Amino acid sequence: MLKQSLSQKMLQKLSPQQIQLMKLLQIPTASLEERIKEELESNPALDEGDDYDDVFDLEKDAYGNESESEERNEPEFEFDDYLNEYLDDDPSSYKLKNDDYVNEEERSMPVPVENTFHESLERQLGMLDLADKENIIATQIIGSIDEDGYLRREPSAIVDDLLFSQNIETNVGEVNAIVARIQKFDPPGICARTLQESLMLQLEDKLEKEPEKHVEERQIALRILRDFFEEFTKKHYDRMKKMLNLSDSELKDAIDEIVRLNPKPASTIEGNSMASQYIIPDFIIYNRDGELELTLNSKNAPDLRINDQYMEMLKGYREAVQGRRATRPEKEAVLFIKQKIDSAKWFIDAIKQRQDTLYRTMYAIMQYQYEYFTTGDERRIKPMILKDLAEVTGLDISTVSRVANSKFVQTEFGTRKLKDFFSESMQTQDGSEVSTLEIKTILNDEVSREDKTKPLSDERLMEILSERGYNIARRTIAKYREQLNIPVARLRKELR
């Protein structure tokens, strides 16, 4: 049986302006300039300049300034009423979002055009005397090599690719034969299926091109890679010495030959990697005789305004419809202008809000970590979490998180990520609270000073920190070590 009922519920919905602001908060200064250029290109009502307030005075006139209307003794004109009159006729004509809206997450940084790794291989391929079929197979193989220089695709899959895409019928044997020829290309080690194969190809190339240099060491190194690769990766040196009947010095010389090889052979080719990503700081902190001064990067405060011509056009349409009903083309023109001006206003306001939010958040961080910014001593970094800054600034935790993400601050001690200043706290034996960053710094220092022939175990590192007043469990030591990308003691061992 059908029944009617009333219910109340609360919903939170983000406006287009709020969504735009959140997206702008996330992007760093390096990407902001590109984002502003895109907005300038897509919205003709947005222009570069600094007379933002004057333009809004003009806009008030365009929408109907009461004092001006009274002085002219003209009937008051409400622009919103004018719009609503047309919207009732055709509600689908007015859109809050531009058709040329671009998702922030889909945008990528531009990369300059230059010779790539694959182009280098194709040029070398042109020097081989290959039949048409072989050339097509070789081109397919080169296209399957990744940016590190490895052939990650199985020969059987390449056979299938050639059949479906090129209508070329081949077999695994033919593919492997051409792979072997491509492996002779420069740089040595490319087109290998595994790291082991790549290193072996590089050593074989050295033995062939430099037959009189370090022959014995390289032959031993080649045997280690071929027959004892697992022992080598796990640094089971004693086992290798015993099985190969080598002395410490002989094993060390052979391992040194392997260590000098390139695990990513394609990285040696200029133009293979992405364009250099230079760090552009979002904030700059100056130390003025012990007093800290915070400034935003100048690119954080662009000068934007609304185009004068659009404002004059809007004002002109207002005067044109005095005493008569606007025609449909006039309504459409006004709606277009209104849409573009509103979009420009939202963007300018979002930029200003971004600037204010960034400054408030960074200022709170600067005050919280004042001792670090004046001394540069990482041990002075205090425990700080997102909630602490949210309480100080009055911002939401998610907003603080967006500000801290991918942002950098330039200090007299170097440029650092904002995320580096966030850490949990823990108590020492005397009851004081310290940052986990301080513990990680001590841990890193101890590992850097250790005897590499007898590296410190996690158990020993725990004892050292305990002696210094930090009671930390061994599993916590292991967690911090992994966060610092420090391998276990066995993998840090070196031969003398």
Image: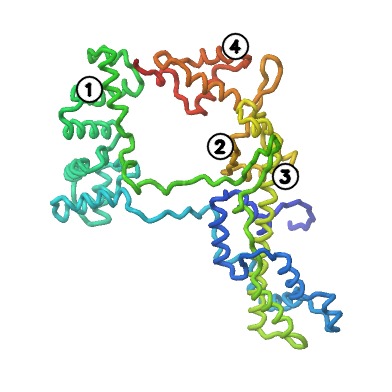
Tell me: 41 left or right of 387. left
Q: Which one is earlier in the sequence, the residue at label 4 or at label 2?
A: 2
The residue that mark 2 highlights is 414
Task: Compute the Cα span from label 4 to label 1.
Answer: 44 Å
Q: Height in image: 338 above or below 250?
A: below
Callout 4 amino acid: Glu
Task: Compute the Cα span from label 3 to label 4.
Answer: 41 Å
Tell me: 217 left or right of 423. left
Q: Which one is earlier in the sequence, the residue at label 4 or at label 1?
A: 1
Q: Height in image: 376 above or below 312?
A: above
What residue is at 47 percent from the left and 46 percent from the top?
277
The residue that mark 4 highlights is 467
Kindly state the secondary structure of the residue where label 1 is placed. Answer: helix
Q: Residues within 10 Å of mark 2 (few under 14, many from 20)?
A: few
Q: Which one is earlier in the sequence, the residue at label 2 or at label 3?
A: 3
Q: Position of residue 206 (x, y in %)?
A: 21, 32
The residue that mark 1 highlights is 217
Task: Compute the Cα span from label 1 to label 3.
Answer: 62 Å
